[in-house]
Amino acid sequence: MVVVLGSVNRDVVAEVAALPGAGETVIAHAVRLSVGGKGANQAVAAHRLGANVTLVARLGDDPDSVQLRTELVSVGLDVRAVRGMAGYRSGTAYIAVSGAENTIIVDPGANHSWPDGLGADTDAVASAALLVLQHEIPERINKLAVQTSSARVILNAAPSRPVSRELLSRCDPLVVNEHELADQVGSQELSAIRPAMRALIERGARSVVATLGAAGAAWCTTDDFGQVNAIAVDAVDSTGAGDALVGALAGELAAGAALPMAVEWAVAAASASVRATGTHASYPDRDVVLDLLHHDRGLPTSDPGHVLPSPGVDLDTVAIVDE
């Protein structure tokens, strides 16, 4: 079983012609409300792809909490460990979307509550075969989770904050984008992707996956390294694509896939997700991912495939971002 311990938000998504700059006001041409939060997104993505998923999360005691729970149930998630917290409001994310680009501001609300630790959900976390964590809940809860569970751990270090050695030593993998990779290693210390990932292995991570946007993703273990190209698609909305990747990765690893194969599958799932607007509505099922891999990689539709080389990309020299 995959246990996702993380956030649930009410997403307020404003579609704009161009993202505003500092001090600039822009007019939205459409606004939509949906369920979001990295925990909910990753749980739904894994569930859509066939994984057995339990979501452990905290909502407020406001009207949003009722609707959020209802929407999570409607997609088939096990929400018995999604609990309302008296005196708290539910988390909210304010998202501006322009084409395939977005900016996000999060009000964590109940996602930062957890006054009784894991409380009644200790057994659910302890029973996980694979545990997925993110940084939209408190560090102390993530630490408590890895102390409670002996499961394989995926930590998506987003939003960016330092990862303690205690957590890093359990990460298999640590998942970061280029900004988060730069933050974890210090952009002044290392300036290229592959050495930066290697540095995190040397600091204790069991494996690392770096998401590279349109370039796909790279993976690194103690003795191996590889990259998977993204699949070229007509991108409409990138909101939640990183969470689609993490959810897909979790499902494949829980099913016993090796990391290289799981990363290729996850990159394909993320590529599929950007072809439609929204988060959960854009997340693919297994048939969609298999079809995409078949047409792009020439792989049979019954097999998630194998890692292919990425010609022309040298991650020993490609710079990581430093902003």
Image (tube, grey):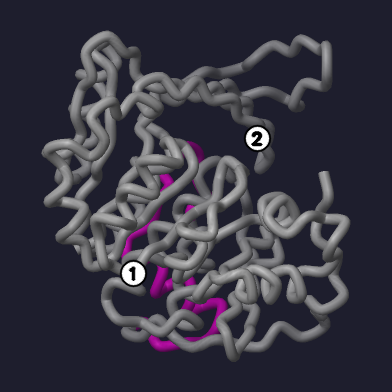
Residue occupying the point 58% across, 21% down: 14
Q: Quadrant of residue 208?
A: bottom right
Residue 281 shown in magenta: yes
Mark 1, other Cα within 10 Å: few <14 / some 14–19 / many ≥20: some
Residue occupying the point 30% across, 81% down: 256
Q: Is residue 41 above or below residue 84?
A: below
SS for dot 1: strand
Q: Quadrant of residue 251?
A: bottom left
**Left or right: where does residue 102 sit relative to residue 49?**
right
Q: Which span of residues is magenta-colored?
A: 273-301
Q: Is residue 76 above or below residue 197?
A: above
Q: Quadrant of residue 100?
A: top right
Residue type at mark 2: give it. Asn
Q: Which residue is mark 2?
A: 102
Residue 173 shown in magenta: no
Residue type at mark 1: give it. Arg
Nearest the camera: 23 or 137? 137
Residue 204 position, x and y percent, is 55, 71
**Count of number-bearing discs:** 2
Comparing marks 1 and 2, which lies closer to the viewer? Answer: 1
Residue 111 position, x and y percent, is 37, 28
Q: Which residue is mark 1?
A: 152
Q: Earlier in the sequence, mark 1 or mark 2?
A: 2
**Left or right: where does residue 175 sit relative to residue 111?**
right
Does the rendering let one see residue 262? Answer: yes
Does the rendering let one see residue 280? Answer: no
**Left or right: where does residue 60 sit relative to residue 104?**
left
Nearest the camera: 125 or 273? 125
Residue 249 position, x and y percent, is 42, 66
Residue occupying the point 23% across, 13% down: 61
